[in-house]
Amino acid sequence: MLDDPLRVLRTIRFANRFEFTIMPDIIEAAKNPQVRDCMLNKCSYERLGIELDKMFAGNKPQVSVG
């Protein structure tokens, strides 16, 4: 996730879309401060916005932010 921090948002989006359960080790990795820093420093705000828009356009957007 340090290499491509957008994977965090994609994981949440696809888990919501296909009603998958995210494994606890993936959740813990996503909570890592290094991953969050990489997301803010490596990803453009435009790309983050696109992923968030896709998450909120899903079938259960409240699950994506819960």
Image (spheres, rainbow, N blue to C red):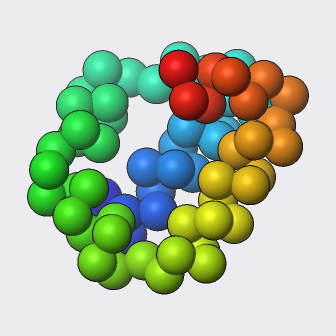
Q: Is residue 40 above or below residue 27?
A: below
Judged left or right of residue 61, residue 22 is left
Residue drawn 64% across the image and 59% down it: 51
Residue drawn 14% across the image and 50% down it: 33
Residue drawn 59% across the image and 74% down it: 47
Q: Quadrant of residue 24?
A: top left
Judged left or right of residue 48, residue 32 is left
- Image spot of residue 21 (x, y percent): 53, 18
Inspect this view and state whether residue 24 appears. Answer: yes
Inspect this view and state whether residue 18 appears. Answer: no
- Image spot of residue 20 (x, y percent): 62, 22
Residue drawn 16% across the image and 44% down it: 32
Q: Is residue 57 above or below residue 65?
A: below
Q: Is residue 12 above or below residue 36?
A: above
Q: Quadrant of residue 18?
A: top right
- Image spot of residue 59 (x, y percent): 85, 28
Q: Quadrant of residue 38?
A: bottom left
Looking at the image, how many numbered discs can be counted on the residues? Answer: 0
- Image spot of residue 1 (x, y percent): 30, 58
